[in-house]
Image (cartoon, grey):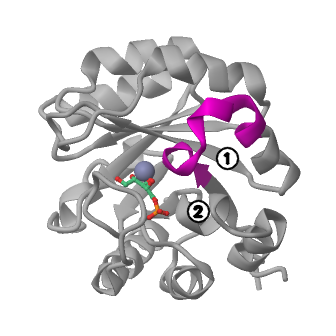
Amino acid sequence: MIKIEYLTAASVLAFDLSDLGNEVRRCAEAGVDWIHFDVMDGRFVEQITYGAPVLKWVRKATQLPIDAHLMVEDPTKQIEFFAQAGADIIDIHIESECDTAACLKRIRELGKRSALAIKPNTPVEEAFRYLPLCDMLLVMTVEPGYGGQGFMADMLPKVTAAREYADKNGLKKLDIQVDGGINTETAASAKKAGANVLVAGTGLIKAPDMRAANSALKGTL
Ligand code: DX5
Ligand code: ZN
């Protein structure tokens, strides 16, 4: 049996931003695999967070891969900025107002890993035709916009359907990421459903012992 390597991604949304560099280093020391950088534009979702100029500072503070989750109305131009700022993985939403296939291709052309994200109300089947252009599918397990929300267990069948589709269609290397309300318990059910990348804001950053929380998410504790 092939052993699946589970990866964790810590969400910057839960950081103490007055201490950004240290927060990033704390994640690396705890064994976190990626930094998840949530970008909100006040249009696609109601809040505004931060953009590529801030990602540059995260890049300066760490060697860890940076995963930029673009919750923006039109990511077309932002892809260029984030690639230049040093993102390694760029996630666009299928619900964004852009040419999805062209954006995914452009991300790869820039030498980055491409990811497609779907909101809770979007059927996973809508993402299938784009998967050959993706290195990762992001199944949102909360409504995007805020950290600290409750996990939507009814998203798990979407994860399973995506994993089955990927396996059947020769997309063995596709990462499937879950984002929102991930803690030790919900991570276990997401992994069982077929996810291999776990984003956690609250579950990692606010944990009393981040290293233990990270190991628990990965299932190595
Ligand atoms: C929500 C963001 C998530 C969020 C996760 O819109 O995409 O990445 O930061 O936070 P938790 O883990 O606290 O639900
Ligand atoms: Zn996110």
Magenta residues span 10-24
Q: Is residue 64 visible?
A: no
- Residue appearing at x 48%, y 46% in the figure: 13
* Percent position of residue 14, x then y: 53, 51
- Residue 168 appears left or right of 206: left
- Regarding ligand 1, which quadrant of the image does it lie in? bottom left
- Residue 19 appears left or right of 26: left
- Residue appearing at x 35%, y 86% in the figure: 153
**Looking at this view, is 135 or 178 the one in front?**
178
Q: Which residue is mark 2?
A: 197
| Tally of numbered discs | 2
**Compared to 156, does 96 lie above or below?**
above
Question: Do the residues bearing badges 2 and 1 touch, measured as CB atoms within 8 Å?
Answer: yes
Quadrant location of residue 69? top left
- The quarter of the image holding the C terminus is bottom right
**Looking at this view, is 102 or 16 the one in front?**
16
Quadrant location of residue 165? bottom left
Q: From this viewpoint, which residue is outermost toward the front? A: 18
Looking at the image, is mark 2 or mark 1 nearer the viewer?
A: 1
- Residue appearing at x 73%, y 51% in the figure: 33
- Residue appearing at x 29%, y 14% in the figure: 77
Quadrant location of residue 213? bottom right
**Compared to 101, does 145 lie above or below?**
below
* Percent position of residue 67, x then y: 55, 39
Q: CA distance from mark 2 to mark 1?
A: 9 Å
The magenta stretch spans residue 16: yes
* Percent position of residue 100, x then y: 23, 35
Which residue type does callout 2 highlight? Val
Which residue type does callout 1 highlight? Trp
Query: Judging from the image, what secondary structure is the residue with disc 1 in?
Result: strand
Q: Which residue is mark 1?
A: 34
